[in-house]
Image (spheres, rainbow, N blue to C red):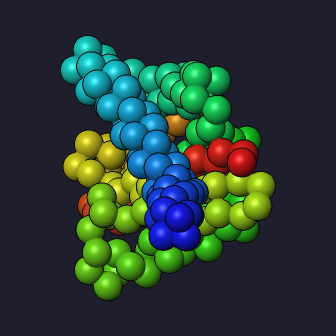
Amino acid sequence: MKQVFLLILGLLASTSSWCGGDRSTLLEQEAEQLAQEFAKTLKPQLVNALQQGGPVEAVKICATAAPEIARELSQNSGWLVKRVSLKARNTSMAIPDNWEEAILEQFDDRRANGEPAETLSATTQTNSEFRYMKAQGVGPLCLTCHGETVAPNIKQVLDSYYPDDRATGYRLGEIRGAISLTRPL
């Protein structure tokens, strides 16, 4: 009887450990999927805008579609989804908090030490929330609006949407910012 009790107790403990111990892993996977969904939803819209109307149309998509995608993902998932950057384009939405700023700086350091931008992510968990960030690197298309040289007509449109724009001067492969996700626990 004692052996059966110990066996049941052991099974309960391992099940409890399995369910509770993997919660952060499950949250990280969920956050990763949402970050990918954000990018997979926005990128085709940007590519289409570039093909149909050039960079000026792409700026309009970033200004309108990206915040809407983040809002929809937030409403449908229970996560707060946003984009942040050390050099924010939209200073009303993309300014990082202290944790996000520290992680963005770590991403810059890690990239400078050879880690590719697309592999960089970070998590943290407190009693009240789980947080996840996924780095966004500068790709070839990004340089049109975020590079060291931005055409005057594009700069004019950027200024109309983002009067305090600081998101230029990037080089290929640098960290432009991150998708930041927060979930209350």
Kindly tell me whether residue 134 is visible in this rendering.
Answer: yes
Kindly tell me whether residue 153 is visible in this rendering.
Answer: no
Report which quarter residue 103 is drawn in: bottom right
Q: Residue at x 53, y 64 (%)?
A: 1
Q: Residue at x 33, y 55 (%)?
A: 138
Residue toward you, 94 or 20: 20
Q: Position of residue 54 (x, y in %)?
A: 29, 24
Single out the residue that lies furthest toward the bottom: 113
User: Does residue 155 appear to the left or right of 183 in the view shown?
Assistant: left
How many numbered marks does the figure carry? Answer: 0
Q: Position of residue 162 (x, y in %)?
A: 62, 38
Residue toward you, 149 or 5: 5
Q: Position of residue 78 (x, y in %)?
A: 64, 32
User: Does residue 178 appear to the left or right of 130 in the view shown?
Assistant: left
Q: Residue at x 64, y 55 (%)?
A: 130
Task: Reply above or below: 70 against 173.
Answer: above
